[in-house]
Amino acid sequence: MHLAYPAVLSALLFCTGLYGVLARRNAILVLMSVELMLNAVNLNLVAFDVWLSRTAEETLHSGQALTLFTIAIAAAEIGIGLAIVLAVYRNRGTSDIDRLRDTAEGHEPDHADDSDAPAAEKAEATA
């Protein structure tokens, strides 16, 4: 098998994942797209490892070992990411990334009106 086939497939998977990260609004779909990108990298690592082991006489399989580490890190990342998304969904009621970004950028809650109330009460008490 030629090296071009897995390389093209990996490029297509990576571009699909990149599109999903940039275009999706749901946090779970963004996490799935990141996993798709990591799997494209894993496919490249294994394909180039097999290709290099055919040209060289040594068989270290360092690309395949690195792929195993990447899979383990991706599993930990998806576990922590899903836990964070579920906690945010329980607190805010949505997993829409745009709404979460809007609430985190400094929109004051309704308590801002309460801070003016004691000043108005002091003004009425002195009058």
Image: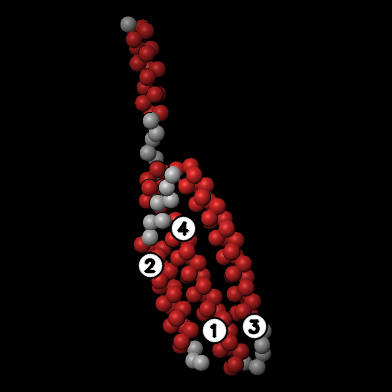
Residue 98 x/y as whole percent: 37, 51
- Residue at horizontal 53 percent and vertical 55 percent from the top: 82
Q: Which residue is mark 2?
A: 19
Query: On the picture, is 57 further left or further right than 100?
Result: right
- Residue 123 in picture, x, y percent from top left: 34, 12
**Between disc 3 and disc 2, whose residue precedes?**
2
Q: Callout 3, which amino acid?
A: His
| Structural crowding at the residue carrying mark 2, measured as other residues with C-alpha within 10 Å and reported as few (<14), some (14–19) or many (≥20) | few
* Relative image position of residue 104 (x, y in whole percent): 42, 44
Label at residue 28? 4
Q: Nearer the viewer, mark 4 or mark 3?
A: 4
Q: Position of residue 11 (x, y in %)?
A: 43, 78
Among the two numbered marks 1 and 2 on one chain, the one whose residue lies closer to the N terminus: 2
Could you give the CA–CA distance between mark 2 and mark 4, rounded to whole angstroms? 14 Å
Instruction: Give the residue displayed 55% in from the left and 52% down from the top.
Output: 83
Q: Label 3 to label 1, Cα distance in Å?
A: 11 Å
Q: Amino acid at mark 1?
A: Ala
At mark 4, the secondary structure is helix
Q: Nearer the viewer, residue 90 or 35?
A: 90
Q: Residues within 10 Å of mark 1 (few under 14, many from 20)?
A: many
Marks 1/4: CA–CA distance? 29 Å
Residue shown at 49% from the left, 88% from the top: 3
| Circle 2 SS class | helix
Q: Which mark is residue 47?
A: 1
Please determine whether, in this image, residue 24 is positioned above or below residue 95.
below
Give the mark nearest the N terminus, 2 or 4. 2
